[in-house]
């Protein structure tokens, strides 16, 4: 057995998240990840993908929060793979379970416990590789049976590789080498004498495999050799022989250990990358059970200002409720700014969250919660939501808002998206409107896309009058009787957010009190 012999499974990689590289499980996530998780309620989405499985949860978290780094080719690559997964869920679960079983059996085997003794390394790696070869055979069996049911480039390449690299002849050769590596007939070494008569240049030799007949052994001339027998009580000699054997097998032990690591790393990578798709299957199953629509979004390149959708809804809200939630339809193509105003509790914040979730899910290569969705790719997504005052704040709410805005400005780049929810409302109407106007105008000049939910009428009205053609203005629908439909319609900002509806609902459900008129308009009790 040649000591440098290595198995070419070290070149294998699943590559079902990226076409030309592995998924970096330890990559650094964006510094604003906590804000995204909190404001978009990503915990709900990730729990729906993972259930109680923390590994699936971690995979969903890292895939979602790193998604803004993906380019268009990667997103389309994943979309096609996910479509295959949705068509063949049982096969994907089988692949994932096989990878999980392999890793668990390896853990129970005690692999990873380092040893500095080549003999221990040799024994452990040989034993482990025999188990791993069996798992590779099962993996190839899945590829042979189900390959023709998959159409995506990712799975097609994976299955072709498995069938090609894990042929019967190749696996049989591994088994042969493993049998030799156990050295059932002892170790055959060659060495030379050094300048001081020390042993040097140890080479491990392969035992003769050809079996001679008895008469051939008698008649054949044996090669010249000198033989000695070690006395059973010669401890010093035993140590010398053991050291010589260790030097002879050390390279084989290292090679087999590396080979076992290569095979195991393939199964770990397979599990990690399939975990994302298992999460997508779990989420899809929950949404489908409620009859919620999903679609694979159409992509546009960054800077094209493309955004339109049909029946877009908040996936996280749907996961919290028993019934289907209301979706919204809008066309913001050519617009860098969306301003959302209207009735309190009319679905404005829910709509804002649906935009952020759809953007993340799209760039992750997932389906989105809508009947149709097309948007441009953005290099970064930020949220600036109002925060309730708590003990952790070192200053007032307004100062805290400005500090978070300063942090966003330090990271934002052209074509990024910023979602504002009731920002800068911690001060008075006039001051808040002016601050919001200056910040929004400055961001628009830097080609930042903005979606802003606000009750600041002066701010919204100023932008409507000055930027009416460059922005989309949506308003939460309210019926004449005060009911909320949770739909957003295109419309100019109104001076009231209908806080009196909430007052009547809570304090005057029977309509005993008259509504006070102020300046010919209903007073807004929320202001």
Image (cartoon, rainbow, N blue to C red):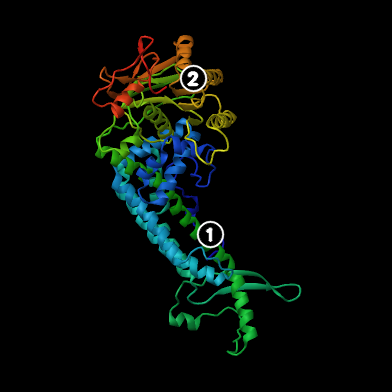
In the image as oriented, which residue stretches furthest toward the front? 513
Q: Which residue is mark 2?
A: 429
Q: Quadrant of the C terminus?
A: top left
Q: Pick the residue in front: 322 or 269.
A: 322
| Residue at 39 percent of width and 54 percent of height | 99
On the picture, is 266 further left or further right than 498? right
- 115 up-or-down from 430: above or below: below
Percent across and percent down for residue 117 are 58, 71
Percent across and percent down for residue 514 are 29, 18
Q: Pick the residue in front: 142 or 316.
A: 316
**Nearer the N terminus, badge 1 or badge 2?**
1
Q: Pick the residue in front: 120 or 320.
A: 320
Q: Are marks 1 and 2 in contact (CB under 8 Å)?
A: no
| Residue at 53 percent of width and 44 percent of height | 27
The local crowd at label 2, few if under 14, some if 14 to 19, many if 20 or more residues have their Cα within 10 Å, is some
The local crowd at label 1, few if under 14, some if 14 to 19, many if 20 or more residues have their Cα within 10 Å, is some
| Residue at 41 percent of width and 47 percent of height | 57
Percent across and percent down for residue 111 are 48, 64
Q: Which residue is mark 1?
A: 258
Say whether residue 151 is visible: no
Q: Which mark is residue 402?
A: none
- 246 up-or-down from 386: above or below: below
Mark 1 and mark 2: Cα distance apart in space = 67 Å
On the picture, is 395 further left or further right than 159? right
Find residue 451 and report its image quarter.
Answer: top left
Percent across and percent down for residue 293 are 28, 32
């Amino acid at each position: 057995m040649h000591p440098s012999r290595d198995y070419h499974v070290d070149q294998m990689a699943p590559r079902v998240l990226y076409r030309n590289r592995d998924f970096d499980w330890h990559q650094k996530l964006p510094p604003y990840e906590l804000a995204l998780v909190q404001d978009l309620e990503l915990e709900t989405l990730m729990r729906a993908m993972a259930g109680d499985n923390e590994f699936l949860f971690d995979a969903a978290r890292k895939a979602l929060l790193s998604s803004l780094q993906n380019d268009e080719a990667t997103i389309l690559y994943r979309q096609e793979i996910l479509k295959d997964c949705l068509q063949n869920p049982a096969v994907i679960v089988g692949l994932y379970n096989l990878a999980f079983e392999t890793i668990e059996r390896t853990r129970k085997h005690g692999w990873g416990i380092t040893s500095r003794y080549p003999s221990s390394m040799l024994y452990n790696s040989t034993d482990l590789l025999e188990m791993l070869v069996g798992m590779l055979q099962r993996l190839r069996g899945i590829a042979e049976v189900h390959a023709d049911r998959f159409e995506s480039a990712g799975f097609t390449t994976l299955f072709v590789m498995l069938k090609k690299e894990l042929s019967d002849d190749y696996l049989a050769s591994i088994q042969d080498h493993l049998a030799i590596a156990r050295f059932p007939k002892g170790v055959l070494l060659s060495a030379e004498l050094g300048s001081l008569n020390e042993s040097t240049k140890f080479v491990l030799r392969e035992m003769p495999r050809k079996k001679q007949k008895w008469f051939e052994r008698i008649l054949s001339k044996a090669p010249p050799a000198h033989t000695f027998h070690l006395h059973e009580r010669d401890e010093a000699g035993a140590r010398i022989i053991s050291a010589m054997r260790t030097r002879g097998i050390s390279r084989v032990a290292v090679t087999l250990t590396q080979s076992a690591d290569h095979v195991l790393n393939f199964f770990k990578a397979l599990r990690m990358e399939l975990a994302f798709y298992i999460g997508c299957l779990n989420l899809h199953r929950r949404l489908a059970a409620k009859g919620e629509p999903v679609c694979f979004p159409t992509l546009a390149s960054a800077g094209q200002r493309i955004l339109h959708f049909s029946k877009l809804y908040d996936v996280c809200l749907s996961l919290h409720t028993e019934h289907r939630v209301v979706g919204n339809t809008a066309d913001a193509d050519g617009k860098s700014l969306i301003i959302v105003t209207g009735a309190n509790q009319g679905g404005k914040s829910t709509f804002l969250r649906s935009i952020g979730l759809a953007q993340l899910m799209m760039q992750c290569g997932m389906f989105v919660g809508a009947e149709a969705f097309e948007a441009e790719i953005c290099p970064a997504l930020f949220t600036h939501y109002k925060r309730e005052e708590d003990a952790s704040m070192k200053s007032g709410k307004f100062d805290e808002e400005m500090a978070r805005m300063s942090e966003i400005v330090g990271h934002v780049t052209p074509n990024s998206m910023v979602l504002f929810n009731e920002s800068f409302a911690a001060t008075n109407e006039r001051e808040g409107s002016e601050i919001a106007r200056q910040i929004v105008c400055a961001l628009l000049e830097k080609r930042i896309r903005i979606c802003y939910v606000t009750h600041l009428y002066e701010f919204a009205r100023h932008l409507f009058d000055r930027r009416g053609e460059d922005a989309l203005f949506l308003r939460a629908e309210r019926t004449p009787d005060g009911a909320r439909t949770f739909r957003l319609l295109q419309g100019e900002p109104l001076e009231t957010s209908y806080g009196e509806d909430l007052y009547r609902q809570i304090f005057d459900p029977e309509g005993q009190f008259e509504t006070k008129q102020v300046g010919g308009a209903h007073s807004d009790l929320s202001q």
